Image (tube, grey):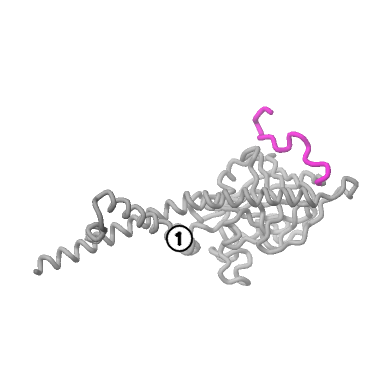
Amino acid sequence: MLYSALWRALPGPAPAKLLQALVLLAAVVAFLFLWLFPRVAPLMPFNDNTVGASPTGGVHAPLVPGDRA
Amino acid sequence: MRNRLVRWVVGGLGDTLVTAGLVLLLFVAWQLWWTDVEANRAQSGTVQQLTRDFARGAPAASGPARVQPAPMQFGKAFAILRIPRLGADYARPVFQGTDYETLQEGVGHYDGTAAAGQIGNMALAGHRTTYGRPFHDIDRLVKGDRIIVETKSGYSVYAVERHDIVAPTAVEVVAPVPEKPRARPNAAYLTLTACHPKYSAAQRYVVFAKLVRTYPRAGGLPAGALQVPGKKA
């Protein structure tokens, strides 16, 4: 549906469409890797390596809110 | 007409689910692979920078033979961690602080814990997986393995004593005397903490080490100090 509509909307013959689709895909992956994922990762529960007073906090968690290394 | 609407809704839902699945797969790839690529590059760059800085500021050969704690600045790299068991070329930068951003850049030094070679407990945290995973193979360390902390003033060589698997709340492992929160230290310890099990944060894998001796920068490390244990030179 969405993808077939996109395919139809791209101009030119099939090889040109393919090339444009790949460029779009690369742009989307770059956006995810460089912008979205780095911002989402701190919210994930599997990145803690320190010991601290709270299960998700560093030693100084009460002093520095948001410290959850 | 109604048939077309149903087809449109179902098709749109399918597209959305497929896209969501692909994004989740990409997130896993990013977390497990790309963060390592980025962090390894950044961390080896930091180690090179530190090595240059250390070489420039090396004290004269006639200087006093002791390792002085350098002033700590939060979020700044101040030492290089070397663990021969994890490879003769294993070298990771040590930053001051253990918050989320700092641990992406290298190993973190818990605020308020001892400096390298100092009486008390120098406590370090590092990623077990992702972000360059400096402590991925921390469970391969065995008693007697050397851990070397290189600072501007010299080298502190610690020997592994034991390990423990503790709850994430076990702050006593970074106490001045590890696991004895009330005791006064009369020796220099080193404690490493990392995730356990791998790909989880349910527990912490902790390695305890004790200072063997320190070497001033001028003299350098003795030959063979970085040799991988159990491997012939």
B55 to the left or right of B172:
right
Q: Secondary structure at mark 1?
A: helix
B52 over A6 or under it: above or below? above
- Return the residue found at the far top: B232
User: At x 67% / y 27%, what residue is drawn?
Assistant: B232
Residue B228 drawn at (x, y percent): 66, 35
Label 1 lies in what chain? A
Amino acid carrying mark 1 in the image: Phe
Q: Which residue is mark 1?
A: A37
| Residue B185 placement: quadrant | bottom right
Q: Nearer the viewer, residue A19 or B173?
A: A19
Magenta stretch bounds:
B217-233
Q: Nearer the viewer, residue B97 or B114?
A: B97
The reply to whether residue B81 is in sight is yes
Q: Residues within 10 Å of mark 1 (few under 14, many from 20)?
A: some
Residue B186 drawn at (x, y percent): 80, 54
Q: Nearer the viewer, residue B135 or B177?
A: B135
Residue B117 drawn at (x, y percent): 77, 51
Residue A48 drawn at (x, y percent): 54, 58
The reply to whether residue B188 is in sight is no
User: At x 63% / y 50%, what residue is drawn?
Assistant: B45
User: At x 28% / y 62%, what residue is drawn?
Assistant: B16
A22 to the left or right of B88:
left
Magenta segment, principal secondary structure? loop
Q: Quadrant of the C terminus of chain A?
A: bottom right
B107 to the left or right of B4:
right
B17 over B229 or under it: above or below? below
B57 to the left or right of B4:
right
Q: Nearer the viewer, residue B230 or A3?
A: A3
Q: Quadrant of the N terminus of chain A?
A: bottom left
| Residue B104 placement: quadrant | bottom right
- Return the residue found at the far front: A12
